[in-house]
Image (spheres, grey):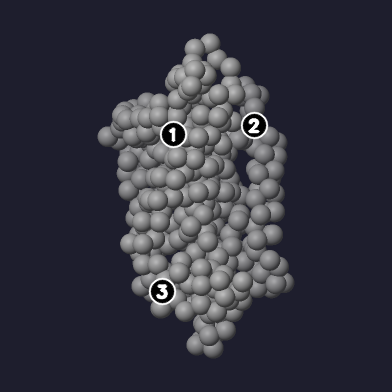
Amino acid sequence: MRERIEWLFGVVLRFSAAERVLVSLSAVVFAIFVGGVVVLVAGYAASCESAALYILGAPVCYNPVEVYLVMLEGSFGDSFSLAATLQWTTLLLFTGLSFAIPYRAGLFNIGAQGQFILGSLATTVTLLWLADLAPSGLAGTLVLVPVGLFAGTLVGALYGLLPGYLKVRFEMNEVITTLLLSFIAADLAFVAVDRFFTTDDIQGTVTDRIPEEATFSPLVFPSSTDFSLPVFVFALVVVAGCYWLLMRTAVGYDIRAMGAQPKAAVFGGASQRFTTLFSMTAAGAVAGLGGAIYVMMILGRWQTGTPPLGFDGIAVSILAGNNPAGLLPSGLLFGALESGGRAIQLRLGVPSELIEVLRGIIILLVATPELFRLLGAHLNRRGIIDVDTGGSD
């Protein structure tokens, strides 16, 4: 049995880049088929006034072909749909990076959600404080935008540094600390806004709106969309910068070496303490930067109910092989599923629960091959299995 398992992992780990892409595409096709079957079964069990199709004389409420066509149209069919897809993709690029960077160092940052929330709150509070001090017009934009982005990045970095310090100082598992710190961040932000930053004329736990000069206005896309194309380009620049950092710098080499062979990396002169602190701080910084953009591009204020972008970023990173170069197609898939799912619910009346099941099936089946490969690589690095990868990562 052990030999069979090692043989199976060996086949997967020796896949070339083209073969991995082919496997991913095959997984997408299989996921679409399985999702269609689930839609058919759910449509057969549901009750509706008019059937979408009949199978062997039995009425079925949902037509899987129509569901997928609406999902595709709701993701890329027009400028509004494309803006919604790219909006979600932009944020997932940051949270995906927040998991990918420390993973390359052999660390698991499960706390991007908390870093994202505190980064968005720090940006909001800073911009509200500067609202009466900054000039108006273009001069105000030149002051407020960099300060807002810096505030979110700084607070996210500090909140990412905390679990890194706990690991190097007390050897606390970063999976546990980052996960628990996410819940602490959400509750801390809620209490802070509810006690200090809300006003009596606003219902709910929300802040005042940040100055108009500090928001990112839609460009190219319709003004009614909450998406700014320059912000998307900026996100791509950040992804490219992180890829350069990991693949073309001495720090990046130490990060990758620490993740691949920790003992050999330390023997070669790499500092495990510095690598851990740097990786977790960088992860928190990009997550906090994403939180800043979430406020400045979409909400215009801080409010409760932040979507689980930090946790979705983990799946985005895994699907991309935890390589910044693969985050764009992976993030686009998740963004399309999000915007397309909303279109299905609005136009076809499909229950939100079924849409979540459909999205979950697609994500699970598409991510499983890459997750299996990463598991094999991890077991091989730890010596649990002995597989000749042929020099592949």
Q: Position of residue 3 (x, y in %)?
A: 57, 75
75 over 235 or under it: above or below: above
Looking at the picture, tell me which residue is in the foreground, 56 or 346: 56
- For the point 47% across and 50% down, the residue is 366
- For the point 49% across and 37% down, the residue is 35
Which of discs 2 and 1 lies nearer the camera? The answer is 1
Q: Name the residue that disc number 2 marks.
A: 205
Q: Amino acid at mark 3?
A: Ser
Marks 1 and 3, how far apart at CA: 36 Å
Q: Position of residue 192 (x, y in %)?
A: 67, 41
Q: Position of residue 389 (x, y in %)?
A: 45, 76
Q: Residues within 10 Å of mark 1 (few under 14, many from 20)?
A: many
Q: Amino acid at mark 2?
A: Thr
Helix, strand or loop at disc 2?
loop
Which of discs 1 and 3 lies nearer the camera? The answer is 3
Q: Amino acid at mark 1?
A: Ser
Q: Name the residue that disc number 3 marks.
A: 392
Image quadrant where residue 176 sits:
bottom right
Helix, strand or loop at disc 3?
loop
Marks 3 and 2, how far apart at CA: 50 Å
Q: Residues within 10 Å of mark 2 (few under 14, many from 20)?
A: some
Marks 2 and 1, how far apart at CA: 26 Å
Q: Are marks 2 and 1 in contact (CB under 8 Å)?
A: no
Quadrant holding the C terminus: bottom left
Q: Name the residue that disc number 1 marks.
A: 339
Q: Residues within 10 Å of mark 3 (few under 14, many from 20)?
A: few
Taking the image as shown, residue 151 lies to the left or right of residue 203, namely left
